[in-house]
Image: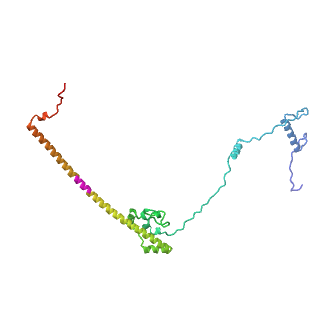
Amino acid sequence: MTPNATTTASPTSPPHSPPRSRSGAAATAAASTTSTANGCCSSSSCRKPPTASPPRKALASPACASAASATASTPAAPPLVISTISAIGGKKRVRWSTITIHEFGVGLGGSAVPSKGGPAIGLADAAPEFTWTTRVGEMAERSEGLHRFSAEERVRLLQAAGESDGMILRFSRETNIILASRRRALADRAHADADSEEDEEDEDEEDAELEKAKAKKAREQERQAEALKRASRKRKAELHDARPCATFLGRPPMVPASYV
């Protein structure tokens, strides 16, 4: 025996049972199982023909059945769609309203519509700071001391911002119109305030005159009532002196004369 050889010990079969091949044993077991299932024994005396058994259905476990039903009832998930929106930032540029915000505002009469007196399209910010035609702008100017640009400063700022001469001329004309309108609005408001003060003074004077007239009329009515009372008392006294029983005779009788 060589050193590299390996030996395996096989179990010895009993002396009374000869060795059988593995395929023969399997065939014998299958035949016995089939004959027993068909209701027939393996003896030679039984001549009953074998009956074919119906095919059996494989029984599935409850968990497998529920999983299969859930899979059949659940619709297929739609494919995942990822939409990307690219944010496009607007180009920043210097606007006329950003330079003259404190005197441009919304403009004529507090309107943002160009046809109703507001600035032209593209010349006003989306949210102006305040409107000069209201008292809010005046109070802000007095309290904060806001700087107002002159015409030359405005032109220089626009030229430095890269605006063309034609647009600068257009902006200047619109600004002149708006500032003139603002001056007219302030002047009209001043005149209206003065007129309202004069009207209030006139109303106060008229009220005082009416009060005086009412008081005078009330005093005259009181004098007339006193004079009537004195005349009535004097007439009654004269009648009593002439006929002492006239007071009682002049009264209506309490019991009628034709009373039965």
User: Where residue 245 sits in the image (x, y, percent)?
Assistant: 10, 34
Q: Residue furthest left?
A: 242
Question: Image quarter for residue 64?
Answer: top right
Can you say whether 167 is above or below 136 in the image? below
Which residue is at the front of the view, 126 or 175?
Answer: 175
Q: Residue furthest top?
A: 260
Q: Is residue 238 magenta?
A: no
Circle count: 0
- Residue drawn at 43 percent across, 69 percent down: 177
Coordinates of residue 65 in the picture (x, y in percent): 71, 43
Q: x, y (%) of residue 24?
A: 89, 43
115 relative to 244, above or below: below
Magenta segment boundaries in residue numbering:
206-213
Q: Residue drawn 10% across and 38% down?
A: 239
Left or right of 159, for residue 184: left
Q: Position of residue 94 (x, y in %)?
A: 49, 70
Q: Which quadrant holds the N terminus? A: bottom right
Tell me what residue is drawn at x 24 percent, y 53 percent.
Answer: 211
Q: Which sits in the foreground, 148 or 181?
A: 181
Magenta span: chief secondary structure: helix
Instruction: Say if residue 160 shows up in the picture.
Output: no
Q: Residue at image x 85%, y 38%? A: 34
Quadrant where the image shows the C terminus? top left
For the view shown, which residue lies furthest in the front direction? 258
Q: Is residue 191 visible?
A: yes
Query: In the image, is 250 to the left or to the right of 52?
Result: left
The image's colour scheme reads rainbow
